[in-house]
Structures are given as C-alpha cells and as structure tokens.
Image (cartoon, rainbow, N blue to C red):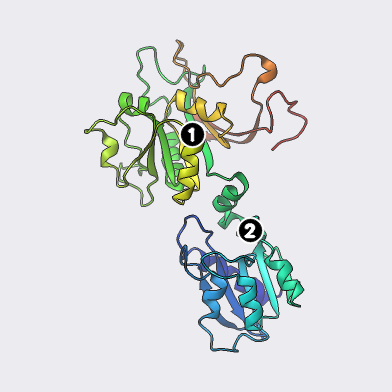
Amino acid sequence: MASAAEHDAMRRALANALRGPRGVNPQVGAVILSPAGDVLAEGWHHGAGTPHAEVDALSKLDPGAARGATAVVTLEPCNHTGRTGPCSEALIAAGIIRVVYSVSDPGDHSSGGAARLHEAGVDVEAGLLADEGSALLDSWLAVQRLGRPHVTVKWAQSLDGRAAASDGTSKWITGPAARADVHRRRALADAIVAGTGTVLADDPALTARADDGSLLPDQPVPVIVGSRPVPADAVVRQHPRAFLQYPGDLRSMLDDLRTRGIQRVFVEGGPAVAASFVREGLADELLVYVAPVLIGGDMLALRDIGVSTIAEALRLRVTGVQNLGDDLLIVAAPRPARGRNPEEGVA
C-alpha cells in the first residue's frame, strides 16, 4: 500500500512530467524518496535521446545516495535499450529497493520493467494515481494502442444533415458558443486537417483563436490533404506553423505525422475528407455540432462512407451530449465492426 509520502511524490512526479516536451516520447516525471519519505531528487524526461526521468533524477544524487531509496515514477520504468539504456537496470544498479509507478508501459519493446525489477528483488507497486497518470499520457497511450495518431473528425451541420446551402454558403451554421468550443479543441490537437477542396473554396486559416480573434498560445500544425496546389495567397500560408501537404493516402499520412511527434489529429476539412477518414476506419472520435436550422438541398455534411445497406451501417457509441448556446454537440465513437448489434458491446 502506497504511503502518504509516496502519494505526494507521485503528484510531484506528475507535475514534473509536464515540464518535458510533448512529442514521440511520453512525458514522464520521477521523484526519489529516502527511507524516511523525504525527497532526495526529482527529474523528468527532457526529450528524445535524453536520459529518462528516473535516470535524470538519479543523476542529481551522489554515488550511493539512492541505496535503500524508493523511486516514484509516472510510467513503468522501461526495460529496453534504445537511445538510452534500460531504466530498470539503472534503478537496480543505484540500489533502489522500491518502485511505485502510475501507468504500465504498453509498448512491445519498452515494457517489462516491473518484471525485471521484481526479478532483482525490488518491491514494485503499480497504479498509484492511475487516473491522473493516464490523463497525462492519454495521447501517447492512444498512439501506442492504435499504432498511429488518434483522429477526431469534426463537422457542423443543420438539423437535416446539411453542411451548406445549395449556393455553397456555409459560414456560421452554428453559433458563437459552438465555434468557441471548436477553437478550444483545435488548440488541444497537434495537427488540424483539411482537404484542398476546402482550402480552395473557403480559404480557412486553420488556426485556434480566442473569442476576440487573437491566436491562442497553442497552435496545431496545419495539414492539407490533396494534390492540388495551395494558392500563393492562401490564408493558411500565414499560419504561425508551416503547413504539410499529402496527396491523399491517409494511412501513409498518419504514419508520417506520427514520426513527427504528432499524437492528436483534428479533422475538419469538409464532407469529402471527413467521409474518407470514416470510410477507412480511421476516425476514433466524431464531434458533430448540430444547429437548429433547416437548409435542405444536396449539400450533405458527410459524403459516401461505403454503406449500401442498413446492415452495413456504422454503429456509433455516444459518449457525450452538450448544449452550446442554441446548438448541440454530439460526441461519438465507432463501435468495433459494421453491422454489429448495438447491444453486443462497445470498443
């Protein structure tokens, strides 16, 4: 059972983890406690190729000072050699006799640290403040589970499922509260995706903005899908971050974005692009903003997703419903397989 000192140390470790950069590697923090529960040292992961959090903390101690101590870490110590050595071996060599961590490492190559520590006679406890640890690592954990960035697909529509009027106008189907929510979510993403059709037709900025129109501190990387050239005077060229463009292979695009450290992708690039992600099974979360208006016509909010009969319908699990002014936000996730009975379980 974790002590009060270990609970306090884990909170410090979680705060330390946030000092490290977001990217390909997880944000991890560590605290070394004396047998009496006093903090001896603390550290965090400073980025790819640098010492991991445990080693960073140990490096701040004199040789032998960690003997008999406890290491409190937000993520299970790794057990593999990459750009750095295994943290499990570093802890054993330092004389650590107890390790407390929050979240287990799901990696095929990096996991196994807890087992190695047990083997060496180290007392190990897992799951301390697991909810907080998982929240800290949610993006990284999603990438480990999916093998690609987590994808949120967003669209706004009228009550009758239209994204625009018959003349193509679509600006402000939804109200200011819904738009503010979208910009907040954009700022939480690593990348924002739009198709070349949307770029050419609407000339979007693809930025995250405050209510007064100013840029929010965190800006997603703009990503454009399609082979048509982006005009020299396109507003997206004024984005504080240079845009990336891909011809249309979504899986290949996501693989490349992962190598760039992008973990959360926000798609709002028009009905065709949204449908492409859904059709290829790459939409992990759907955000549908519904305005209480009727438009009619054939400007649907979502194009063909490959469903020809009701048995093939993509069943969704609604995870949230929220009123935003006059509008309604529905948050949903696809169920495991098409045509499956909605009572059979969820992903």
Is residue 44 something that shows in the picture?
yes
Residue at the extreme left: 233
- The residue beneath circle 2 is 109
- In the figure, is residue 345 to the left or right of 254? right
Amino acid type, label 2: His
Residue under the image location 53 percent in, 89 percent down: 62
Does 21 sit above or below residue 144?
below
Q: Residues within 10 Å of mark 2 (few under 14, many from 20)?
A: few
- Mark whose residue sits in front, 2 or 1: 2
Which residue is denoted by mark 1 in the rendering? 250
Q: Is residue 75 above or below residue 208?
A: below
Q: Secondary structure at mark 1?
A: helix
Where's residue 277, x and y in %? 52, 30
Instruction: Please state which of residues 260 and 150 is positioned toward the viewer in this rendering.
Output: 260
Q: Position of residue 17 (x, y in %)?
A: 52, 65
| Residue 202, picture quadrant | top left
- Residue 265 - label: none
In the rendered image, residue 191, in percent from the top left (x then y), is placed at 43, 43
Against 97, residue 45 (above or below) is: above
Of residues 289 and 224, the one nearer the viewer is: 224
Instruction: Tell me how many marks there are.
Output: 2
Residue sitting at 37 percent across and 43 percent down?
208
Q: Cα distance, mark 2 to mark 1?
A: 26 Å
Which quadrant holds the C terminus? top right
Left or right of 300 in this view: 89: right
Residue at point 65%, 59% (across, down): 105
Residue 99: image quadrant is bottom right
Query: Does the residue at mark 2 contact the one at mark 1 (Cβ under 8 Å)?
Result: no
Quarter of the figure with residue 150: top right
Q: Residues within 10 Å of mark 1 (few under 14, many from 20)?
A: some
Identified by mark 1, the residue type is Leu
Q: Of helix, strand and loop, which one carries label 2?
A: loop
